[in-house]
Structure formats: C-alpha cells, structure tokens
Amino acid sequence: MKKKHNVMDQRRAGVLLHPTSLACGEAHWQPGKSEKFGTLGKEAYHFVDWLSEAGISVWQMLPIGPTLDDMSPYQSLSAHAGNPELISIDWLIEKNWISREKISDQYSSSAELREQCARLFYGNIEQEQWAYLKQQLDIFCQEQAYWLDDFVHYCAFRDHFELKPWNQWPDALRQHEDQAINQYANTLSEKINRYTFEQFAFFEQWKCLRAYAKQKSIEFFGDIPIFVGHDSADVWGNQSQFLLDETGAPISVAGVPPDYFSETGQHWGNPHYHWENMQADGFVWWKNRLRTQLQSFDILRIDHFRGFEAYWAIPGNSQDARLGQWIKAPGQSLLKACFDEWPNLPLIAENLGVITDEVEALRHEFNLPGMLVLQFAFDGNVKNPHLPQHHTLDNVIYTGTHDNDTTKSWYENLAVSQQKIVQDYLLSSSIQMPWLLIEVALASSCRMSIIPMQDFLELDGAHRMNMPGTQGKNWKWTFRWDMVASDLAAKIYKLNHQYDRIA
C-alpha cells in the first residue's frame, strides 16, 4: 500500500481554470488574432492574488503542452513541452531578456513575434554582460535534453515539411536516424534555436509564477492525458514505444465506447502504447514523462485512468469508435514502477464514466484519490456514488469538469422532473444555482473540492470550455475581470472558512 500525498491530508478548495482562459493583458502583442488568450504574465499573477484572497489553495489546469490548430490540450505536440502561446512578451522585456525598442511591429502572428524575440535574445546572450543568462540556457538544455532535443528538432522539421506529420517525412528522417537528423538540423539551426528559446522562456516564466503561488500557499494541479498525439515529438522520437506499422501509422487508436457524452463513442485517434516494450525497459518513457510534470506541478491527474487497466482499441484504419474492443493493460506494473521511483507520487485518478470493479481495485491498490462530479449525482438512484452521502475523504469533488456544461446551464436544461430530484435532495433550498451546488461541493466530506471558474462567475452554457465529440468552438473560452464582482473573493473566502477549507 502506498502513502497518500500530503495534499489530501487537509481540506482544501480549488478552482479549475486553464491558463489560456485567463484574462488577456497583452492583446497588443497579438495583432490580427480573433481570440486573445492569457499568458504567464501579469494577469496570471493577478489571478494568483485573487485565489489567495478567496481562500483557494489549489489551481487546477488542463495539460499545458503546445497544441494543434484545434487547440485541444489533449492532443499536444509534446508530453513535455510548454505551450509557447502562453509566453508573456512583457515578462521578457521586464526581465531585460529583450528590448521593447528593438521589436519591430512588422509581424502578423504571435509565432512571428516570438521569432523576433528569439533573434534578439540570442544576440544579447553573446555579449559578456549576459553570460549568466547564457549559462542558465545551457543548464536548461542539459537538464531537459531527454525530451528537448527531440522536440526542437521535430518542430523545426515539421515546419520545413509544411506541417506534414512525421510519418510523411523522408524515410531516414521518419525513422529517426541520427545522420538524417544532423543533416537537416545543420540547415535549420535558426528554427531550432527559436524553439529552444521558447521552451526556455516558457519554463522560466512558469517557475517564477509557481514560486509566487507557493508564497501564497497555492498548489498547482496538472493534468496528464493518458495517451499522446500521433503527430508529436513523443511518438516520432520513441517509435518502439507505440503500436505502429512499418510506415509509422498507428495499428490501433484510442477512444471510448458509447457513454454519457456520446451515443456513438469517441474516436480520439491517439496511437496505443507498445506495453510489452515499455514493460521490458522498466517504463522509462513514463518515468521521464512524470519527471517533467513533477517539475511543474504539485498534484497530477491521470486523465482516463481506466486505460491503465484496459484500453479501448479501435482499428487504426477505422473512424468508428464502436468497432473497438477492450484490451488489458499492465497498469499494476506501471504504477508500481512509478511509485518505486517516487514513493509519495501525488497522483489523482480520473475514474469517471463506466468504471469496472477491476479499475477501482487498481486505484485502491495504490491509494489514489478519485473524482466525483455533482452534476452526475441526481439521476434518482440512491446508490449513485456522486451523491453526497456516499462521498469519502480521499476523493476530489467537482460541481462539473471542463467536459461538463456550466452548472447554471446544466440545471436550467434539466427536465422539470430532474430539477425536482435535485431540489428534493437539497431540501428545497432557496439558494440559487450555481451557488447551491458550489456550497454542496464545499460542504462535502471530500478533502479536496474543485469549482470551475465559470461556476464562480455564474456563467451560462455559452462559456463552456469543451463539449466532447464536437469541434470548432472548444478550448477558446476566456474570462474578463469585469465579470468578477468586487466582493466575489470575500464571498468565496467566507464559504471556504465556513466549510473548513482554508488551507
């Protein structure tokens, strides 16, 4: 039996908000963009201050890696890298990495702006007075080489081949041969430098923000998608760790059968792991992945934890999730290897959906907290584990998650008969939604309670972060500070104090 991480040793309150959803304080650096997203700059620090005022000690986020055009953080280009769109240009200027006066306004995208910043940065660190910064960069590159080298090469090559996935590159490069990598790297050194700069800047900014949050007793809660994207540095650089055919195409891909979110199941498209090869080398790939995440977060959620016990395997040449089958995975061996490496590994298991006894047995074997969601509770079944009378200390309770509707919209769209079930259970309280469900979550016996920012702001379904099984409008939501009432932090603090959640 493994010891629970001390984050579950006391009652805490948290908020669910991805950094891209922060109010954007640097819109002037993003000309021509229809969406303006937050960064790791001043608005992130402002948010940390607000969390502290509200008595909130956990900031939960979605995966922070670089995304494809659909912006889904669950289909990242890397399981290790940070999203360069979160880099604060103002921070770079304030830290004297670059000079505002030297930045040209001749750019049409944030990527072009970062290219300028990279060139200015590399010009500066060649000067003697910048030797300390060059040394910091060298140390970063050495310490992170186990993932950084593949990532920066992959990004540069992907640009060179007009964003084609790696399995459509020339054969020698597709097969990750050193000679081919070195040959292309010699001609693409400026692009490689830019991607290296972006990762250095991202993680330096992240380190500073996390240290500031630590001063205010706020923990960072990260999210690890169990699978990685096929078009990623991870798969290109570690092909033996995935089930691929001789062309690099996935033999089978991930998804889920029909469930609460989709009548036809979900086809995610991620390649499955070659578990035999992973087990043979002691799960080095997974240990490296966790090592990177533990450098950035205090708590980690494993998304789709049930895939450690068995995974839904859809034929690689099919788009129909219903054609998949469950295949057993070596989750017990994997988790044992990880806990042997980090005895107090702070993992939380996402165990939502159709969860079998075998999945729960695996979770309990390693004392992993699970998740409960109040929006799933009121179906009329008195045995429903999401109902408050069944809550236990070692679970995390949510009003809803990033995949749910906002609580206000959820309740308003319930049938009258279901609304009555909610009201009867909650003693016909006069408290309005979403605050009624927020109070239930904070009053829960679960030691950690997480509330989406949309619920604190009383927002409707137009502000939903994600609707599983759909594309086009997801992952784009941001809030503005004029949505935040001046007394909201005090109101939340009072509730956190009332329910003993001031950490």
Image (cartoon, rainbow, N blue to C red):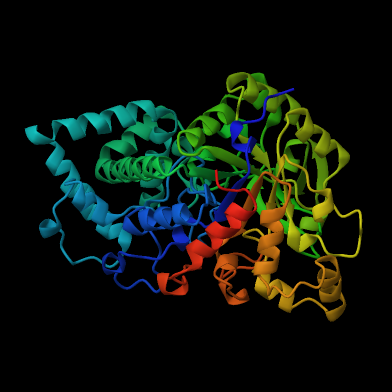
Towards the viewer: 128 or 273: 128
- The reply to whether residue 144 is in sight is yes
Q: Position of residue 441 (x, y in %)?
A: 69, 57
Q: Is 189 left, or right, of 125 in this rendering?
A: right
The part of the image, by quadrant, that contains residue 195 is top left
Q: Number of numbered discs present?
A: 0
Instruction: Pick the quarter of the image with the N terminus.
Output: top right
Towards the viewer: 207 or 193: 207
Residue that lies at the very extreme toward the left in this rendered image: 128
The part of the image, by quadrant, that contains residue 34 is bottom left
- The reply to whether residue 85 is in sight is no
**Residue sitting at x 26%, y 52%:** 91
Towards the viewer: 199 or 221: 221
Instruction: Pick the quarter of the image with the C terminus.
Output: top right
Q: Is 21 left, or right, of 183 in this rendering?
A: right
The part of the image, by quadrant, that contains residue 252 is top right
Q: Position of residue 237 (x, y in %)?
A: 49, 34
Q: Position of residue 430 (x, y in %)?
A: 73, 75
**Residue sitting at x 32%, y 31%:** 140
Q: Is residue 60 above or below residue 296?
A: below
Q: Position of residue 421 (x, y in %)?
A: 86, 70
Towards the viewer: 343 or 74: 343
